[in-house]
Image: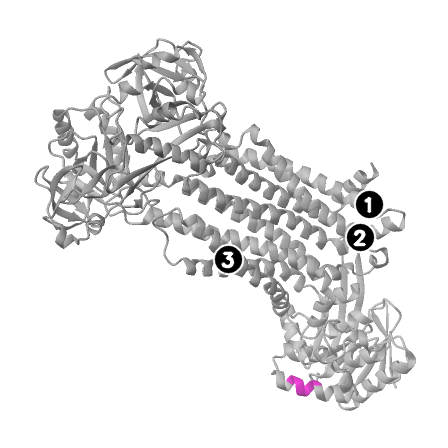
Amino acid sequence: MIKVKDLKKIFRTSEIETSALNGVNIDVNEGEFVAVMGPSGCGKSTLLNIIGLLDNPTSGTYMLDGKEVSGLKENERTNLRKGNIGFVFQSFNLIDELTVAQNIELPLTYLGISPSERKQMVKLVLERINMSHRQNHYPNQLSGGQQQRVAIARAVVANPKILLADEPTGNLDSTNGKEVMELLGELNSKGTTIVMVTHSARDAAYAHRTINLFDGLVVAEEHL
Amino acid sequence: MNKIRYAFKTLSAYRSSTAIKILSLGLGLTMCCFIFARVAHDNSFDSKFRDPSSLYQLWMQFSIDGKELPVQQACLFPLAGACADELSDIVSSATVVNPLGSKEFKNGGNIVEGDLIVTDSMFFETMGVELICGDPKAITADGGIYISDVAAKKYFGDESPLDKDLYYGEYLLSVKGMFKSWGEETTLHADFIGNIYEWCGGYRINSWDGGDRWYEYIRLKEIPESADDFNKKITAVLLRHNPPTESISIKGMAAPIRDTYSGSDQVRHMTLTLSILGIAILIITSLNYVLLCISSLSRRAKAIGVHKCNGAKAGTIYGMFIIETCLVLLGALLLGAFFWWLANRFAQETIYDNFATYVSFDRVWIVLAVTVLIFIIAALIPANIFSKVPVSQVFRRYTEKKYGWKHALLFIEFAGAALVSGILVIVLAQYNTLINTNPGFDEDHIALVYNPSNTKEESEALLASLSGLPYVEAVTKSQYYPGSGYSGNIISNESGKKLFSTRYDYIGENYIDVMGIKMLNGSFPKDSSEVIVNEKFTELIDMTPETAVGKRIHFGGDPVFISGVIEDFTTGNYYQPQQPFLGNNAEKYTLRYYNVKLSEPVMESYMKLTEAMPEILGTSKSVHTSLFSNMKIETYSSVAQFRSLVVIATILLMLICAIGMTGYLSDEMRRRQREIAIRKVNGASTVSIVKLICRAVLVTALPAVILGTAAAWYFSSLWLDQFAVTLDGLWLKFVLSGILTVLIIMIVAAALIIRRASANPVENLKSE
């Protein structure tokens, strides 16, 4: 499903040039749960952003579902991302001014789904994460674990083929972290492809395979 | 000293923001000064006379059958003198003046030209005009003339003008005195002063029975407590000498000479509209500065916190911001001086007749007043807000709580922009209406030749010469011309009852055809027993063009028959309603004006005509020719200048608003950058982000524009009140103006947002 070949990403400023990825090769199959690990600054998040079509690589190829997407323009990336890729971040990234239900509804509004259908889809996903009773609450009224569950619900509400998670338990205690990882595992078991960036070996244990990055290169791969 | 150093450092650290603030304040300040200088100019007319507050002008108002006619400044000749004699406890002196307009004199081979007023021996004493040299009583002697110091300097340099010979045609005059000019800002401009009895001896001087053509002034011993009581006394003087008839009565009144110009409808309306524009720009400029400051609050809160953590009190922060605003204002003043210089050099005729007259050193108080007012609003509000920033919150995103402030300021800016744009649309449309309304005659093809001093033979010869020119289609003559306002006379019915005052003219037989005026019924008068009238005239005698022909009326007491009715045409200008008109057959008379119909291309024919005139008339005679279409543009030149001023004010205000919106939106985008990034990650495109922010702007812009447009409607209607002919579809123009303003706001907002909206969301999420 995801084929990345000789992927490079260089960040340039007027003074310095930083190489974040130095020729990464990765394959992720449909339905797979892959954990990307490595020390800070090794290029994990950069790789995730490129896979998630938030950024373009400097060079190399990226085939998504058999289609080359590395050179797409911003609008084309947005259109392809919509409904196909969901994101979960370490800092939850919920919009403070919107309620739980409105936050979850967000990707559906950009897909042009009718309000009644959106309402139904939000209701289903809220039930799935056991947050129906909190649907009219605002993010600052929820615990960290609850916020991350809402963020996951938002990421999967449009039934994307791929879910990208950037240290989803980084801001959570162990109990809440476990809950979130179990939720991701459940989603994967129902067919969602997941690529997760993590520092935690415990979280990585939920994945089928781990990929280790170091200085922008894949240095090891391990099937669990 | 430290505060000044910090203020300088801050201004230089935020260079682009400082430049924007100086630019917006500089533009606003300059425009306010231009506008208020014009308002001050229009309100300072006739203030150069000695003790102008006790110098009054006399006015009269006729009533016919109880219906009051407009108040007129032309009075019966003996009125001023009678007031001086009979109200001597109040009036110390009085004078009568007749402004004869521009005249040409010859001194040897040189032409000496200027405005001539003729008056009596009480002029200098009453008006308080200084006679620099010469004898004040010599004005009563024939052949004497006085010259202003300005005209004397212009024509005779450092030589004494006394006893210089000036020829007016064949008539010899001698300069008997030099008076100090009372400036350009006057309703009684004079380069020369002559003897009223010598120049106007042919008119009915000293008569209480008609001849209301004199401007009269009185000097008061003390200002009357009740203007009404004083006016009643003047009316009593008038009625004592001129008892009311069955249908006509007269009222007299006096008003300070300084009110003559500023109190006129045109000036009053223009002053009101300009004052509103000026105040709107002043408020918006100041609030725009406040908006820019508040928008930078989130950026600067941390620095304020550091100052406070290190011992700065609220007063210290307050002082720093006051100094900062002072420095920005200083920069704005320097920039304003540059704009001032630019306008003086390149654009003065666009907005003012004579820039130096309006914008002189003695109006420097306007700059000071505007600067102080802007300072009060622009400096105090942000200084107050910044000094109260709590230290506990400055290291967070402090801007959140100032959201309402920013919206309120933006609302006022948008409302101001809509107000000014609404006024602009109406001023543009009205000027267009004034210039393009069909005057009822063929103004595009007709040139006017003025030749006052000719004999009947010379007149016939001139007509023949003009008719013979290859680029002239036809020529006709008249005593006055459309747009001149004409002279008036009373119309009575068959029983002698006075009905109304009509405008009248003496016109050539082919006048109606040549001028392109439409004949509705009947024919041209065959002799002096018949007259031709317009539609308005027939309305006032309760008839129609069909029934009026053959009707007998009395014109100035003489019975005449109506031989024909013509369509209405402009007798004066579009400030006045359509007037009744009566045309007499002029075949017997030698007239002043020759109306020349030119062939196409008109401008080329006109140029040829002006070149040919000295040859036709001889070089010893001065010739005045002009095209009716040009005269019309000249008539409404004050509206054109006003239009230019409003155009410039609107552009500047829009620019200031755009600058304010830049500050607001950049802060708003910074405030919402995380939200925008999240939305983008979840599928929002750049367009949808632009729409989202624009929608927030629209929520403020829409009610603001509606309010501003409604205010524009109200103030424009007041301005339009001065015109008898006004534009069509007023409401539609306001709707369009409102829509256009909203569109401009949204386009500017979208242009400002799009760059930030298309930024990579990853960067914004990282910065959180």
Q: CA distance from mark 1 to mark 2?
A: 9 Å
Quadrant in the rendering for residue B570: top left
Regarding mark 3 in the picture, which secondary structure is present there?
helix
Q: Which residues are magenta?
A: A118-122
Amino acid type of disc 3?
Thr
Instruction: Read off the residue under disc 2.
Output: B388
Residue located 64% across and 37% down the image: B333
Amino acid type of disc 1?
Gly
Residue located 49% across and 61% down the image: B739
Tell me which label, 2 or 3, sits earlier in the chain: 2
Q: CA distance from mark 2 to mark 3?
A: 36 Å
Instruction: Read off the residue under disc 3.
Output: B709
Quadrant that contains the C terminus of chain A: bottom right
Residue B421 as seen in the image, left or right of residue B26: left
Query: Quick check: is A120 in the magenta stretch?
Result: yes
Residue B203 in the image: state x and y as whole percent: 24, 25
Q: CA distance from mark 3 to mark 1?
A: 41 Å
Query: Quick check: is A100 in the magenta stretch?
Result: no
Instruction: Read off the residue under disc 1.
Output: B315
Q: Judge by depth and name the residue closer to the eye, B694 or A189.
A: B694
Residue B71 in the image: state x and y as whole percent: 35, 39
